[in-house]
Amino acid sequence: MVETPTTVDLRHKSRTIVEGRDRAGARAMLRATGLTDEDFRKPVIGVAHSWIETMPCNLGLRRLAQHVKRGIRDAGGVPMEVNTVAISDGVTMGTQGMKASLISREVIADSIELVGRGHMFDAIVILAACDKTLPGSAMALIRLDIPGFILYGGTIAPGHFQGRDVTVQDVYEAIGANAAGKMSDADLLELERVACPGEGACGGQYTANTMAMAIEALGLSPVGFGSWPQADPGKNEIAYQAGRLVVEQLERGLKPSDILTREAFLNGIALAAGTGGSTNIVLHFLAMAREAGIPLTIDDFNPVSERTPIIADLKPSGKYTAVDVHRAGGTQLIIKRLIDGGYMDGSQLTPSGRTLAEEVANATETPGQQVILTPETAKQPTGGLVILKGNLAPEGAVIKVAGTGRTRHEGPARVFDCEEDAMAAVTSQQIRPGDVVVIRYEGPRGGPGMREMLGVTAALVGEGLGESVALLTDGRFSGATRGFMIGHVAPEAAVGGPIAALRDGDIITIDTAARTLDVALTDEEIAARMVEWTPPPPPSGTGVFAKYAALVSSASEGAIMQPRW
């Protein structure tokens, strides 16, 4: 447990805004918002969230924010609510709108940082629920480096279809099954109607739940708070307690820079690997570590994953949803088992000031649950994340091997220069067993925005090709993706990476045991082809896509925005 400093200035930022004769104008403006003389003597605490009506993931955040604010007031602080944007991966999947998703991570981080700095918050609680809001919120919190944490809005409840629990993953896979004549139009419509029954983030161990759990393990979210589903009546009380906790954290003077270490980041990676989590954590943790000044590279993921067993039986490769995790014992039980097994460092700090081990010491298991396993009964002896390198990916590529029986695939390339062309080929049944579907020019710069490919991967699975084909892209995958699918190939095609040299029929070999990704071409053959290569034109205009494409780094570095001085 961290020692509480004897003197902590609770108004270490906000007094600059409201204190003294020269700030009379600022106080006059703030009085119009409802603040009083008494409020000007209290710490100001931001309550930021990404409530938006474009998706179920974030629908409950504005409600939860009111309970956070109530907790802050009762604990002696002045809350100020802030709203930012969000893009739904699930809604935009397979469209040009999906290009906005990863870019929104940077916009979210920038907007929260700007308001936090501009209005000089003393502390902050950031509520987040969908895929990019979580890392964007974490990046903002790290930059601000004031007491505070992220409160995960929580998962959605599963839908029910023909006697089984379903999520949006099942809908996307059903599209392929329908195209292949394996599911009727009526069944597809019924599934569509029931898969997402209310508010909350997608229900499997997809990107949102992966990031939420990993951020708890990292120390930037209160342990156990995130497991509660968004629509659960108990979530309101959790939000209230979060409001009280942030004031306590402020009183301790405990900041993200006091919590974040290299070991804390390795804890988060272990949590993701040990739950069969999303490959997107690679991008996001690299970006977050850079903001924190913590040395972390893409090469750090394999060693952690190789030593961490998968101890959660979760979708997309398993049976259960995040709601089942909550009922089984929550993230606390997963973390405790990973600490007890020696896979995580329990000495790292959390927002409460207690260590991770102290926070999970009293974790309880629901009798008879089959969701959270032990290292001895693990689904796999090693984790679900693998980094591949080779002459097709000198900087690296990522594959999720949770639930994948294959360790090797060799086959001819079927090359497509955009997701739409690949999807058309899949749904018209032009892909054959053994093929390696290549989708390029979808990287951070080439997209721009590095689209997720759930539509294509799910369609392949739905058509029954999930175990006989592979897919390779410089874009990303949804956390709901399963099968032999390799993403984040770097360098990307748009900057002249080797993937740009591929032609139909080239023999590609993927070997997850050897951690390699190669094409049967010599370096000289690749170089000769690239002499004839013409880079794609940059995005036109001056908007967000053009700015992102001009500044974004490689996926192997987290696809971060790097100013060109």
Image (cartoon, rainbow, N blue to C red):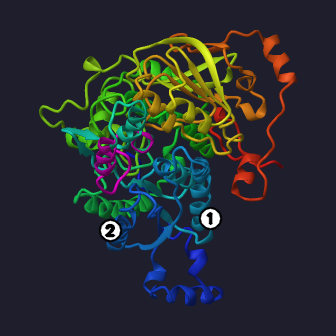
- Residue 3: x and y, percent? 41, 50
Magenta-colored stretch includes residue 204: yes
Magenta-colored stretch includes residue 152: no
Residue 509 visible in the picture = no
- Residue 337: x and y, percent? 29, 29
Residue 550 visible in the picture = yes
Q: Residues in magenta?
A: 186-209
Question: What's the residue at 40%, 46% (across, down)?
Answer: 350
Question: What's the residue at 27%, 45% (across, down)?
Answer: 158
Q: Secondary structure at mark 2?
A: helix
Q: Secondary structure at mark 1?
A: helix
Q: Earlier in the sequence, mark 1 or mark 2?
A: 2
- Residue 9: x and y, percent? 50, 67
Picture quarter containing residue 270? top left
Left or right side of 161 for 449? right
Q: As drawn, which residue projects farthest toward the left?
A: 367
What residue would you read off at disc 2?
Answer: 67
Q: Nearer the viewer, residue 256 or 375?
A: 375
What residue would you read off at disc 1?
Answer: 114
Q: Nearer the viewer, residue 272 or 93?
A: 93
